[in-house]
Image: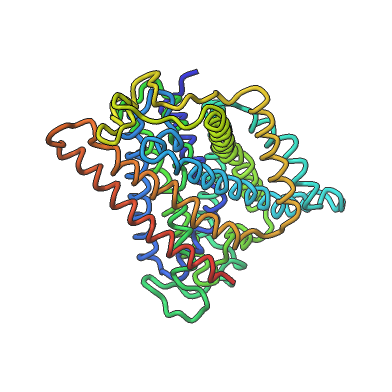
Amino acid sequence: MVASIKSGVLTLLHTACGAGILAMPYAFKPFGLVPGMIMIVICGACAMQSLFIQARVAKYVPQGRASFSTLTRLINPSLSIVFDLAIAVKCFGVGVSYMIVVGDLMPQIMSVWTNNAWLLSRNVQISLIMLFFVTPLCFLKKLNSLRYASMIAISSVAYLCALVLVHYIAPSEDILRLRGQISYFFPPQSHDLNVLNTLPIFVFAYTCHHNMFSIINEQRSSRFEHIMKIPLIAVSLALILYIAIGCTGYLTFGDNIIGNIIMLYPQTVSSTVGRIAIVLLVMLAFPLQCHPARASIHQILQHLERENITTSTTSVSGPTFANENSPLMGDRGLDINEVIEEESIYQPKETSLKGKSFVFITCGILLASYLVAISVSSLARVLAIVGATGSTSISFILPGLFGYKLIGTEHNTVIPFTTRLFKYTGLALFIWGLVIMITCLTAALKLN
């Protein structure tokens, strides 16, 4: 079934608006209100341009075959396994964090109705959610199949936004007692928190790039004019949600804000419904992390299999030397126009992920995620380090590298201005990504 622009927007928005939305007001704490809003806008603009670049470079591979792996092989085949590993680690880590959120919130939700120790067990709740909800959704083969789940999850985000707004407009006495100092510009650093500690929240708020190529592959047309509507709408909606929740949440609690804003609200019907909405959000977002992780693991296994075959063939038949007619001769190089041709001899043949491979890899991801989630109560520092490396790689560094290396290669003479703009914007994003990676990794290592 061909995906629509609407389903693509829902998938991107759902991927971006994960559990991190709960920490958006907390990110304002060392920045203040106005600088915090500026950071949301800047990071949103960078994320949108990066998604635009992904839409532009998808034409350099056959339609329906766009992926980080295939595009990396056009630039430097040896790097493909590195970036597939980064995607797999990042998506796995975020998926585990979702299950940890489930383990934290479900006992609080169940305590409203029961005192049964078994039902209030963190590990029991994670087990039930993984078995009956997450696992069936992870076995869906297309992101388009998750469009209804995405609609439910986006409704959960909308409810959270409404909850935060209502409590800001009409705060209860309990909330007023929790309100701290509000700074409109950079506050005096009277606490241990600094801008490096919360910068990753702004940077990674829009991380949905690992699903962009899957969305492009499922569209009826890969034309840029068609595809660009998806990130334009999705990132714009995410920007509105982040500003609404971030600003009103910070204005409600000031510098007494904590990392999970919903934990500050009193145990009322509205806050309980909000917690249920968050559980729905992270539960339905897990498959959106499983999908690219599964594809990346499959690519890694194929790469290792090809390496083994190549090594075996070389050892049996001896080394193969290029002759004067060989397309791999250094004076000729590898023509990008030949690479993007359908059934090109230079395009690595990929086995579609189905059958036993699909089942085994999916089960492996689910089992590993479950074991880590029930064993560890907090992955904050580990996931901060993983996010600072993996997320920045797939959000800025790799799309920027694709844009700079591939855009404009089809022109033999003068490159049009718009094409050059995208090309050098890609270079800027590549450099920006490296700076952010160093900054965010420093922040992650400084976390207490």
Residue at image position (32%, 51%) is 429
34 relative to 145, above or below: below
- Residue 64 relative to residue 42: left or right: right
At x 39% / y 43%, what residue is drawn?
A: 235
Q: How many marks?
A: 0
Is 337 on the left or on the right of 102, as rendered? left
Does any portion of residue 295 appear in the rendered image? no
Which residue extends farthest front? 318
Residue 108, image x and y in percent? 73, 54
Image vertical order of residue 24 relative to residue 77, above or below? below
Instruction: Point out the residue furthest to the left here.
Output: 414
Residue 5 occupies which quadrant of the picture? Answer: top left
Q: Position of residue 102 (x, y in %)?
A: 68, 49
Where residue 323 sits, quadrant-wise, is top left
- Determine if residue 386 is in view: yes
Quadrant occupied by the C terminus: bottom right
The residue drawn where x is 81% and y is 52% is 120
Q: Taking 407 as reference, is 246 above or below it?
A: below
Residue found 48% across the figure and 37% down from its top: 211
Between 352 and 45, the residue placed more toward the observer is 352
**Colour mode?**
rainbow
Whether residue 375 is situated above or below residue 235 in the rendered picture: below
**Residue 427 rendering spot, x and y as whole percentages:** 29, 50
Query: Which quadrant of the view contains residue 282?
Result: top right
